[in-house]
Structure formats: structure tokens, C-alpha cells
Image: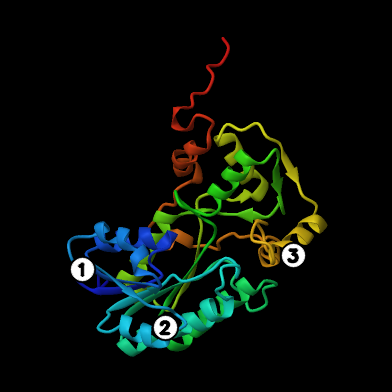
């Protein structure tokens, strides 16, 4: 095991949800960090996560190879976290998740890194019905071509205070008269963002053990989609009804979502919802991590969706 103390780790896409927690865990492990983001002015909050001078923030874009070459100069290890959930923000799946992953990996290989982690997703598959899944698989292949000893992590849904899943459904439950449920029987295994970050650190610290492997990671419990949403609704103390949306209606809505940003689901996301999102063993156990349950973490950040926020008090049971 090499460890990470005083080693230069390049984190591409480090200002996102997972990146913020990974930067903190890497700083705790003693690594020197170069965080590569498209807009450095938006990433200043990362610097206090480490000691003075421990975290450097630089501009870079996975669609611009020269910026990746510069970012990996003198690097010992690297992580690529860049990914998108849809193309409505102007970025494209192929350029970002497939070609971009290859660009990052080739720059890391040219720099001679000894450890590399590619953050992928459960559902990465060349035969996926969704471009998201196909380009995640293409990105994995591009990374393997450049860095055969890279570690690939495929998380299920990732939860934490800034997530785009638990928060989205809590906000919907608060704002809408009913709570729509699409593909309610699909199964998920939500993983805590801190556990995912710690697994990434472990993989970087010990490439002899984890290099060349692909790990699917999830939490301690598998849920049907409708059960997760029902739990969220109950946790924010809402009494609104869950309404199952027929597939043909959801499919029409998703096609509208390809064109209208206000619709919360695209056709690709609907296609991904047709398959279970459950991790194959060994999962986090391979890294010596006991997975953290959704119920142990999410209530703390769901308080803000209750009518009185954190000042909400449940009625005392009638004696």
C-alpha cells in the first residue's frame, strides 16, 4: 500500500457534489491536491477543506486536451469525476463522458500516474437503451485503453446534503398537490457520498490491491423506487398522496423533458429507470467500509422541507 501522504492527486471535476467530499477526504489523507474545474471562481469553497497551500484550483475542460495535459503535470494519481445527467445544460454525453474520460486518462498516463479512479455508474453498458449508460461504458473503455490498471467505481444513487435525488423529491413533495411516481418497482441501493469518497481514497492509496478492477458500490439496503419516495414524503411530514404514473404517460412526459427544462425527466432518464440499480458484491466491503444507511443521514438535511423546518415537532401520541 503506497498511501497518499504528500502525493499530488489531480481531481478532475472536483467542484461537484461528489468532488467536494472527495477533496475533503483526500486532504485528510495528507495528499496534495490539484482540483481541475471549468470555472475556478466557483470552486473557492474547496480551499478551506485542506491546510494552507494543500489545495490548488486550476481551470480545465475535458473537451480541451491541452488543459488536461497541463493539469496532470508532475501528478502521482488522478480521479475523473466528470459526468452529466442530461444534455439540457449544453454539454453532450459523448463529448463529456466518453471522449472526455479518454482525454483525462491519456493525460494521466502521459504524466506517469501510479493510481487512477474513473467514476462511472451502475448501468454503464454499451447496449444500454440510454445514451447516458452507453457513454459511461465508452468512457470506461477509453480509460482502460490508456490506463489498464485504473480502478473503476460504479455507484448506485448517491445521497448527501447536496444530492439531486432526495432533495428533488422532497422539493416536489412540498410543492406539488400529489407526488408522482414513475417506475415505482425499480430497485435502487443508495450510497452515502462520504462512503463513496472513502472508497475512492482507498483505491488511490493502494493501486496494487484495487488497480485494474471494477467495483459497483451501494448502501446497506435495497429499496423499490416507490418506497424511497414514500420514505422521503413521510420524513418531511407530508400527507400528500403518491400517484403511480402509467408508463405510457411517463414516456410522453420524458420526451417533452428532452425539450422543456421544467419537465423533471428526460427520455434517457426514463429508459434508465426501467432497469434495477443494485450493486453486485463485494461493493464497499472490498474497501473495508461498512455502508451507511439513508435513514441515518438524510433526515438531517430533509428538515428544511418540513413546514416549520428544523423547528417542527411531531404531535405527541394520544395516551
* Disc nearest the viewer among 1 and 3: 3
- Whether residues under marks 1 and 3 lie with C-beta atoms below 8 angstroms apart, the answer is no
Bin the neighbour count of mark 1 within 10 Å (Cα to Cα): few under 14, some 14-19, many 20 and up: some
Residue hosting label 2:
105
Looking at the image, tell me whether mark 1 or mark 3 is earlier in sequence order. Answer: 1
Q: Secondary structure at mark 1?
A: loop
Quarter of the figure with residue 98: bottom right
Q: Report, in whole angstroms, how far the alpha carbon at label 1 lies from the one at label 3.
A: 49 Å
For the question of whether residue 113 can be seen, the reply is no
Q: Position of residue 193 (x, y in %)?
A: 43, 55
Q: Which residue sits furthest bottom?
A: 110
Bin the neighbour count of mark 3 within 10 Å (Cα to Cα): few under 14, some 14-19, many 20 and up: some
Image quarter in which the C terminus is found: top right
Quarter of the figure with residue 296: top left
Residue hosting label 3:
255
User: Residue 5 has which mark?
Assistant: 1
Q: Residue at x 47, y 84 (%)?
A: 102
For the question of whether residue 204 can be seen, the reply is yes
Amino acid at each position: 500500500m503506497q498511501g497518499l501522504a504528500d502525493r499530488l492527486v489531480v481531481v478532475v471535476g472536483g467542484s461537484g457534489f461528489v468532488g467536494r467530499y472527495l477533496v475533503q477526504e483526500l486532504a485528510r489523507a495528507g495528499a496534495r491536491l490539484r482540483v481541475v474545474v471549468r470555472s475556478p471562481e466557483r470552486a473557492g469553497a474547496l480551499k478551506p477543506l485542506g491546510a494552507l497551500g494543500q489545495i490548488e484550483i486550476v481551470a480545465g475542460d475535458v473537451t480541451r486536451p491541452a488543459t488536461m495535459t497541463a493539469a496532470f503535470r508532475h501528478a502521482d494519481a488522478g480521479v475523473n469525476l466528470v459526468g452529466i445527467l442530461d444534455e439540457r445544460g449544453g454539454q453532450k454525453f459523448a463529448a463529456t463522458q466518453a471522449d472526455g474520460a479518454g482525454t483525462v486518462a491519456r493525460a494521466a498516463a502521459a504524466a506517469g500516474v501510479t493510481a487512477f479512479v474513473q467514476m462511472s455508474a451502475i448501468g454503464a453498458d454499451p447496449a444500454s437503451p440510454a445514451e447516458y449508460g452507453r457513454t459511461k461504458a465508452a468512457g470506461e473503455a477509453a480509460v482502460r485503453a490508456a490506463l489498464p490498471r485504473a480502478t473503476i467505481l460504479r455507484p448506485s444513487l448517491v445521497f448527501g446534503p447536496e444530492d439531486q435525488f432526495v432533495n428533488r423529491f422532497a422539493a416536489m413533495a412540498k410543492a406539488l398537490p400529489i407526488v408522482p411516481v414513475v417506475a415505482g418497482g425499480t430497485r435502487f441501493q443508495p450510497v452515502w457520498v462520504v462512503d463513496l469518497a472513502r472508497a475512492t481514497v482507498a483505491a488511490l492509496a493502494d493501486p496494487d490491491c484495487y488497480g485494474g478492477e471494477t467495483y459497483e458500490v451501494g448502501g446497506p439496503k435495497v429499496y423499490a423506487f416507490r418506497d424511497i419516495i414514500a420514505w422521503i414524503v413521510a420524513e418531511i411530514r407530508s400527507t400528500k398522496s403518491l400517484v403511480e404514473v402509467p408508463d405510457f404517460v411517463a414516456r410522453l412526459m420524458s420526451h417533452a423533458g428532452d425539450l422543456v427544462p421544467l419537465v423533471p425527466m428526460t427520455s434517457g432518464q426514463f429508459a434508465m429507470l426501467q432497469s434495477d440499480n443494485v450493486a453486485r458484491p463485494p461493493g464497499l466491503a472490498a474497501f473495508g467500509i461498512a455502508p451507511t444507511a439513508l435513514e441515518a443521514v438524510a433526515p438531517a438535511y430533509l428538515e428544511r422541507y418540513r413546514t416549520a423546518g428544523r423547528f417542527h415537532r411531531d404531535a405527541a401520541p394520544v395516551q
